[in-house]
Image: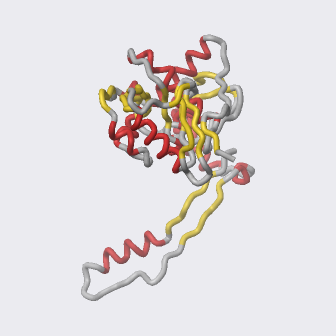
Amino acid sequence: MKEKFFILPRFLGAIALLSVLASCAGHYEVASVERSRILIDSRYDAKPDAAASAFLQPYKHVVDSVMGPVVGRSAKYMTAVRPEGTLSNLLADIMVWAAKDYNETVDFGVYNMGGVRASLPQGEVTYGDVLDIAPFENKIAFTTLKGSDVLTLFSQMAEVGGEGVSHSVRMVITANGQLVSATIGGEPVDASRDYRVVTIDYLLGGTDKMEAFKCGRNVNSPQDVSNNSRFVIMNYFREKARQGIEVDSEVEGRVKIKD
């Protein structure tokens, strides 16, 4: 069972009290702030509360009916880590795979590490698993960057230790966040040519320190709910399932740290 942490902010009570006192005469200051952390894990499953279980059962049935359907299978447990991870590689590749559905031909894909909020389990993958990975309303998006801006983008990725990039990209960075070299499709990035990039709309504004995306042009950013990244990911898993294929991904040197 996955471990979860819950923060209990005791200071909320103090803040509420101060809100009341603020309407009275006088000056008040917070004297102290305390908090505690309780680890919620499998130990609490040993003695389930019957009354609580009964209360939650009708809701659990509804949630399970939504989150439980299987969309495909994963060949192994995958994670998103810097400088390169199996899951971050997979998600960037899925964005490239989906480009055909938007009449787009792209040079590479980017998926930010900050947008990956869970790991991918081995075996059956459910709607709920995909929702855990991509819980936000981010949608697939396309933009064109000048090669010089691509190099800036890769430099910004190097500064944070790497982001999810698709199979065509190879980057070498230093441990202190400098870009050493970069190729796309086996060729050095040409500062003068244009590159078509697929990513998520959240990044187009230069968020997650990838400010080079602000220089993008000819943007294609469909905003229908069906274009949400989680549905793009589920479509990929369903397609592979129809083909009888377990989804897999490898760490293959897309982002390397120079020795």
Percent position of residue 156, x then y: 47, 46
Residue 138 seen: no
Residue lying at 54% horizontally and 24% vertically, measured from the top left: 185
Q: How is the image coloured?
A: secondary structure
Percent position of residue 160, x then y: 53, 50
Residue lying at 61% horizontally and 22% vertically, measured from the top left: 72
In the rendered structure, the answer to whether residue 176 lies left or right of residue 230 reads right
Which residue occupies the extreme top position in the image?
A: 243
Q: Quadrant of the N terminus?
A: top right
In the rendered structure, the answer to whether residue 142 lies left or right of residue 79 reads left
Residue 86, image quadrant: top right
Residue 78, image quadrant: top right
Residue lying at 39% horizontally and 18% vertically, measured from the top left: 102
In the rendered structure, the answer to whether residue 168 lies left or right of residue 244 reads left
Residue lying at 65% horizontally and 48% vertically, measured from the top left: 50
Percent position of residue 190, x then y: 45, 30
Residue 217 seen: yes
Q: Pick the residue in front: 159 or 11.
A: 159
Q: Pick the residue in front: 30 or 257.
A: 257
Percent position of residue 111, x then y: 50, 36
Above or below for 13 versus 177: below
Residue 133, image quadrant: top right
